[in-house]
């Protein structure tokens, strides 16, 4: 049954809320914003058709009860959660469904299952999809010691319900194990409300490659190309691109097949991403599934021409995917750089008020942001303030356009990571596509201690 969405509440803020409003306009859907007091004049509030206050607590974007109350009061027929915040919380998806409103995401029971990385690993393993060697379930300190000895150090301790690069600890030697195990458990208890950890072998010189999936409620699943996100700091992505410059065509087909099989098996619907890491020998291991729109979705949109938010909405309405090819053909290359409000030298946050802005103008460059002069960048929220994405018919053309766009992007009032992004994009390693997930950390260490 197809149910038409005519009014949609966006349970998020910042650039992703603005991004979702754009697609609402295109589809003739009324967009409803929610905001906290610090965000009262934020761009997503200005652009929405209606906006509702969450009150003075800056953390109310996480308040399920308050948001559901607005969902009911505003008379919306759907909720889009964006990314972060509540997008991957089964309790929120269930609360939306219980309110009789369409949830733009997978069913809550599917989210609940995938919230656990070790359950995700077990499902993949049962389907014959390789996962990183390690435990398939949460583990005690004594078991961890035994498994780590078998795997060989270093190992990674991972929060079973971790995310956003948090809740991961590398253990380099047996001596560090007990201390780091306790630190990890304490840390995740406070931030994730679960103290379960599991162990994975640490893959050195890894590359992060992920497959964008679209899956409808009728069992159709397609692979909308892959992205490479190996330029990372503290397990968080900084620069992403599509397609991956390293994988071979047969590796590509392999991860598409794994991804489609996994999503079909769990009867997934919505856009979703299966993350893999690739070792130096080309072995690919599934690491987790992200059940929401991803920060780096624009690179995929630029090489496929598909509006992923539009697809999410249509899938949630119960429509069948119009795209029939299970492996979608893409065109050219796109690279995204995440701009942070931080000092490019110290990498400490740089909150403040935007006093002046100048955007690069190029038809092959897209900037996703929620900026305007007078807007305050608050220390309460994610310091990622914009994404600059460039398309080219070749990787090199995209790279050059991105460097040019970044150097023409002027933001006054706060410091930004733009100079650092340019420095990375002009390294020999980046130009040649020869980097791994440790590249950025090593690059920053070298910068800190010039010989
Ligand atoms: P993506 O996986 O889309 O590339 P990130 O990993 O950077 O993006 O996460 C998207 C956003 O959501 C970031 O702002 C991140 O801090 C936040 N986030 C991700 N997972 C969680 C979580 N479990 N709890 C809180 N915030 C999270
Ligand atoms: P999150 O939910 O926080 O995104 P992930 O499990 O996706 O956590 O891992 C985040 C990043 O950590 C990956 O993109 C990768 O760079 C690194 N990583 C994860 N697992 C491993 C591993 N087994 N070996 C080496 N690096 C890893
Ligand atoms: Mg991840």
Image: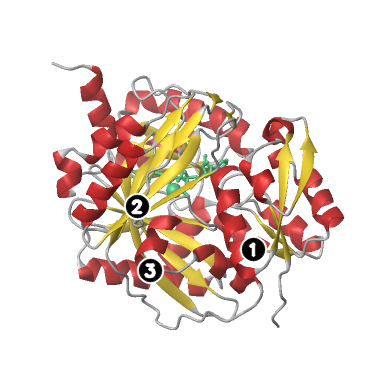
Extreme right residue here? 73
**x then y, percent, for residue 138:** 51, 45
Residue 93 position by quadrant: bottom right
28 or 189, nearer to the observer: 28
Name which of mark 1 and mark 2 comes first in the sequence.
1
The residues tagged by marks 1 and 2 sit, at their Cα atoms, a distance apart of 32 Å
For image coordinates 50% across by 75% down, the residue present is 264
For image coordinates 39% across by 28% down, the residue present is 177
Name which of mark 3 and mark 2 comes first in the sequence.
3
The residues tagged by marks 1 and 3 sit, at their Cα atoms, a distance apart of 22 Å
83 or 253, nearer to the observer: 83
- Disc 3 designates what residue? 304
Label number found at residue 154: none
Name which of mark 1 and mark 3 comes first in the sequence.
1
Instruction: Tell me if mark 3 has few (under 14), some (14-19) or many (20+) residues whose alpha carbon lies within 10 angstroms of its own.
Output: some
Label number found at residue 362: 2
The residues tagged by marks 3 and 2 sit, at their Cα atoms, a distance apart of 19 Å
Q: Answer with left or right where residue 133 lies relative to residue 447.
A: right
Q: Answer with left or right where residue 193 lies relative to residue 369.
A: right
- Of the two numbered discs 3 and 2 in the rendering, the one whose residue sits closer to the viewer: 2
Instruction: Tell me if mark 1 has few (under 14), some (14-19) or many (20+) residues whose alpha carbon lies within 10 angstroms of its own.
Output: many
- Of the two numbered discs 1 and 2 in the rendering, the one whose residue sits closer to the viewer: 2
Q: Answer with left or right where residue 222 lies relative to residue 267.
A: left
Circle 2: element type: loop
- Disc 1 designates what residue? 104
Q: Can residue 153 be seen in the rendering of this structure?
A: no
Taking the image as four quarters, which one is ligand 2 found in?
top left
Residues tagged 1 and 2 counted as in contact (Cβ below 8 A): no
């Amino acid at each position: 049954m197809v149910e038409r969405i005519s009014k949609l509440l966006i349970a998020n803020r910042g650039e992703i809320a603005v991004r979702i409003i754009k697609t609402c306009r295109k589809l003739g859907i009324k967009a409803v914003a929610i905001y906290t007091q610090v965000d009262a004049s934020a761009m997503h509030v200005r652009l929405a058709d209606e906006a509702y206050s969450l009150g003075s607590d800056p953390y109310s974007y996480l308040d399920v009860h308050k948001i559901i109350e607005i969902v009911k009061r505003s008379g919306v027929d759907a909720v889009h959660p964006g990314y972060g915040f509540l997008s991957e919380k089964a309790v929120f998806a269930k609360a939306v469904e219980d309110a009789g409103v369409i949830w733009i995401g997978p069913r809550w029971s599917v989210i609940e299952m995938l919230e656990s990385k070790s359950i995700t690993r077990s499902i993949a393993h049962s389907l014959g999809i390789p996962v990183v060697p390690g435990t398939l379930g949460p583990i005690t300190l004594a078991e961890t010691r035994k498994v780590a000895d078998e795997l060989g150090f270093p190992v990674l301790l991972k929060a079973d319900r971790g995310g956003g690069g948090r809740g991961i600890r590398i253990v380099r030697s047996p001596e560090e194990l007990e201390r780091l195990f306790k630190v990890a458990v304490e840390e995740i208890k406070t931030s994730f409300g679960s103290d379960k950890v599991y162990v994975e072998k640490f893959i050195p010189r890894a590359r992060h490659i992920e497959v964008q999936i679209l899956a409808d409620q009728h069992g159709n699943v397609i692979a909308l190309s892959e992205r490479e996100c190996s330029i990372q700091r503290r397990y968080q992505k900084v620069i992403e691109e599509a397609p991956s410059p390293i994988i071979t065509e047969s590796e590509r087909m392999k991860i598409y097949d794994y991804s489609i099989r996994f999503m079909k098996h769990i009867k997934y619907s919505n856009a979703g991403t299966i993350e893999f890491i690739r070792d130096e020998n080309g072995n690919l291991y599934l690491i987790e599934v992200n059940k929401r729109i991803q920060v780096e979705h624009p690179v995929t949109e630029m090489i496929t021409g598909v509006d992923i938010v539009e697809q999410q909405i249509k899938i949630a309405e119960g429509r069948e995917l119009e795209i029939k090819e299970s492996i979608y053909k893409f065109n050219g290359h796109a690279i995204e750089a995440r701009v942070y409000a931080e000092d490019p030298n110290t990498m400490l946050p740089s909150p403040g008020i935007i006093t002046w802005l100048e955007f690069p103008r190029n038809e092959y460059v897209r900037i996703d942001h929620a900026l305007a002069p007078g807007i305050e960048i608050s220390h309460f929220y994610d310091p990622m303030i914009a994404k600059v994405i460039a398309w080219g018919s070749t990787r090199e053309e995209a790279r050059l356009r991105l460097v040019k766009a970044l150097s023409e992007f002027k933001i006054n009032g706060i410091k930004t990571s733009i100079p650092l992004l340019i420095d990375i994009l002009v390294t020999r390693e980046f130009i040649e596509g020869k980097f791994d997930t440790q590249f950025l950390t090593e690059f920053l260490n070298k910068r800190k201690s010039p010989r």
